[in-house]
Amino acid sequence: MHADPQHIPFLLALLPFIAVGISIPPSIQDWMRGQPTGETLKGMAVIFGLGAAWYWVIFQSVRSKRKQGALTAMGRSLDAWLWAPPATFLVGVGCGFALL
């Protein structure tokens, strides 16, 4: 597999989404066992807030680039910036369930 340096910013931008996805299944498992703590709930709220804010930043950047007439951002098509974060999140959820 060849890793092009041009892809690194795109991949780094997706890391928060896979991290949030991986953290969900263990949290659900804790809640099902009756072990949710205040710290867990606060941590999950912070993580979801940061993930939502990060996606909002990506969305605003794509919208701005489209208004400027650009077709790409950091070497990726603008559409890839919109569908990749939710897809990465779902992959993270799948990995989280696989790790249980």
Image (spheres, rainbow, N blue to C red):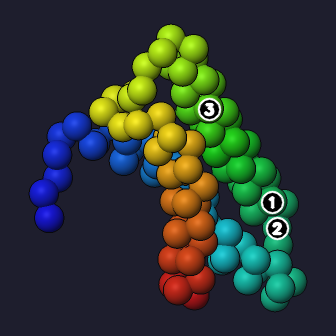
Residue at the spot 47% in from the left edge and 34% down from the top edge: 78
Label 3: how many Cα within 10 Å (few below 14, some 14–19, many 20+): some
Amino acid type, mark 3? Phe
Task: Determine the residue located farthest toward the top in the rendered image.
Answer: 68
Q: Earlier in the sequence, mark 2 or mark 3?
A: 2
Q: Position of residue 34 (x, y in %)?
A: 86, 83
Mark 2 crowdedness (10 Å alpha carbons): few <14, some 14-19, many ≥20 = few
The label on residue 37 is 2
Closer to the eye: label 2 or 3? 3
Task: Please name whichever residue, 15 or 88, is drawn nearer the observer in this view of the structure.
Answer: 88
Nearer the N terminus, badge 1 or badge 3? 1
Residue named by callout 1: 41
Q: Amino acid at mark 1?
A: Leu
Q: Are marks 2 and 3 in contact (CB under 8 Å)?
A: no
Q: Is residue 45 above or below residue 76?
A: below
Please identify the quarter of the rendering in which residue 41 is found: bottom right
